[in-house]
Amino acid sequence: MALALNIGKCTLLGNYRENNEDAIEVKAFPDMTVCLVADGMGGQAAGEVASKRAIEIVPRELKKYLSGPVGNDETKTIIRRSIVQANEEIMAMAALDRELKNMGTTIVAAVWRKGSSILYVTNMGDSRAYLVRGKKIEQLTVDHSIAQALVEAKTITAAEARTHRYRNVLWKFLGSQEVGEGPKVENVSIQAGDRFLLCTDGLCGVVPDEQLLDFMAQKPDAQECADGLGQFALDSGSKDNISCLVIDVVEVG
């Protein structure tokens, strides 16, 4: 049996922000599907510009270089380069326009090639990817925040990081020199029944993983789940923009 993706999308301004600096994109090409969530930053309209450019550039680069038969390692390299290209273009825009000077954006991406049983996942910043399989939820990405760096240095615990004052302070994001040669790209073997969540910290920074799991188990429809998660974040007191993609792996044919 072949696999396909059912995808639900949600992005909300929220109750506390004047602009929605988040951006989401699902780009379905004949041979692949690209799913992206970005969370812009930089004040005024700069964050909106950065997140919008990120979700435009990455699919453009993937369409250019990721067509035809491409091996696993090369696929990862191409995805990584697409993120680097987005970073370079965002930095160039910021250098040319004073109003965009401090702009940046997070990004989390999932790329699936038609006919494949692999989903490629990567991120920059603190937007996350999760896998829900069976009755377990697993965070697939690592936040590029100072709090997470302190966890990795064993200075604080993961539990302490959730409420640490530097949990939202990023040291790596699109629009920064630290991107370097690009992020790590993971390849996840997928099976029917898997559910992936891509989201900004307006959701995962407010709703604990266990509550995400419980809620998603109650919403079998991808779109209903995505809309419900957005509202759940609002009800949980999120003070940020809220965006997510819910990606269900299904059998077809």
Image (tube, rainbow, N blue to C red):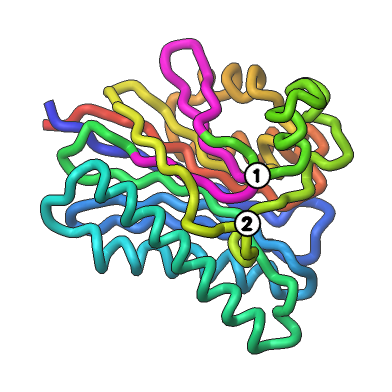
Q: Amino acid at mark 1?
A: His
SS for callout 2:
loop
Q: Which image quadrant for residue 230?
A: top right
Q: Residue at coordinates 74% horizontally, 86% vertically from top-left? A: 98
Question: Measured along the vertical axis of the image, is residue 91 above or below residue 142?
Answer: below
Q: Position of residue 11 (x, y in %)?
A: 60, 52
Q: Which image quadrant for residue 150?
A: top right
Mark closer to the chain start, 2 or 1: 1
Count neighbours of disc 2 (C-alpha within 10 A) and say few if under 14, some if 14 to 19, many if 20 or more. many
Say which residue label 1 marks: 144
Say which residue label 2 marks: 173
Quote the CA–CA distance across marks 2 and 1.
8 Å
The prevailing secondary structure element of the residues shown in magenta is strand
Q: Nearer the viewer, residue 197 or 72?
A: 72
User: Residue pushed farthest top?
Assistant: 135
Q: Position of residue 62 (x, y in %)?
A: 31, 61
Question: Is residue 22 magenta-colored?
Answer: no
- Residue 13 can be seen in this image: yes
**Range of residues picked out in magenta:** 120-140
Question: Measured along the vertical axis of the image, is residue 21 above or below residue 73?
Answer: below
Q: Residue at coordinates 33% horizontally, 21% vertically from top-left? A: 193
Left or right of 249 on screen, residue 58: right
The answer to whether marks 2 and 1 mark residues whose Cβ atoms lie closer than 8 Å is yes
Q: Residue at coordinates 75% horizontally, 68% vertically from top-left? A: 42
Q: Amino acid at mark 2?
A: Phe
Q: Position of residue 176 (x, y in %)?
A: 64, 64
Question: Is residue 133 magenta-colored?
Answer: yes
Left or right of 173 on screen, residue 136: left
